[in-house]
Amino acid sequence: MKLKSLKYLSIAIILVVTTGFWSFNKIGFKPGLKVGQKIDSLNGVYVYYNGSVGNVVGRNTTADGYNLGLKYQCVEFVKRYYYQKLKHKMPDSYGHAKDFYDRAVADGGMNKKRNLIQFTNTSKSKPQVNDLLIFDGNLFNQYGHVAIISKVTASQIQIVQQNPGPNAKSRISLDLNYKHGKWTIKHDEILGWLRKV
């Protein structure tokens, strides 16, 4: 009987922890911020607050009909930045964040859907400012995440991101490691980075 009770207790604890983590990422705890409020900018392109990760306000398109993505999602910010600052339109303007990375493309190869050079995380090419950083999906966010590299040093990168979660910052730094002629960004979910040439 004790083993069965222990099993049920373990399941209950897992459910409570999972539900708590899910709720923490879905419910915003930043008083005073409203969905659509400007919270940061990169080279004059604004980052907007989205509240919960899954919040959807509508689709953002340009005057010429190019799809930038769902308003205030991470994809919308990076595509808006590339469109406004780098004058870049992606041939495939749809897809979730993790879909920006094409697993069939080798390190340094052309990602034809995005018309960008793709690098794997670990790569011979060091990340650069304005590269798109692609995160894989996980248990709590199956769609992945995408951000823009805003600063690169010998040992770190800084990224600017929209919709990283209701309680996360728009700018964070990640460790960068160089070993045996290759660069690795220290984060288990990073698939790689994309670059306009």
Image: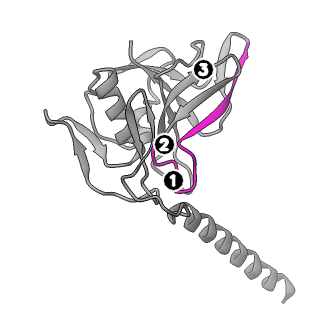
Q: Nearer the viewer, residue 8 or 113?
A: 113
Against 42, is 26 above or below?
A: below
Q: Amino acid at mark 2?
A: His
Give the mark, 3 or 2, whose residue is nearer the N terminus.
Answer: 2
Q: Residues within 10 Å of mark 1 (few under 14, many from 20)?
A: some
CA gap between label 1 and label 3 equals 27 Å
Disc 1 on helix, strand or loop?
A: loop
As drawn, is 2 to the left or to the right of 110? right
Disc 2 on helix, strand or loop?
A: strand
Identify the residue shown where x is 38% and y is 30%: 44
Identify the residue shown where x is 19% and y is 36%: 62
Q: Residue furthest front?
A: 32
Disc 3 on helix, strand or loop?
A: strand
Identify the residue shown where x is 25% and y is 45%: 60
Q: Visible in this render: residue 113? A: no
Give the extent of the magenta segment: 162-179
Q: Which residue is mark 1?
A: 141
- Disc on res. 152: 3
x%, y% of residue 16?
66, 74
Q: Residues within 10 Å of mark 2 (few under 14, many from 20)?
A: many
**Where is the N terminus found, in terms of image quarters?**
bottom right
Q: Quadrant of residue 155?
A: top right
Q: Visible in this render: residue 192? A: yes
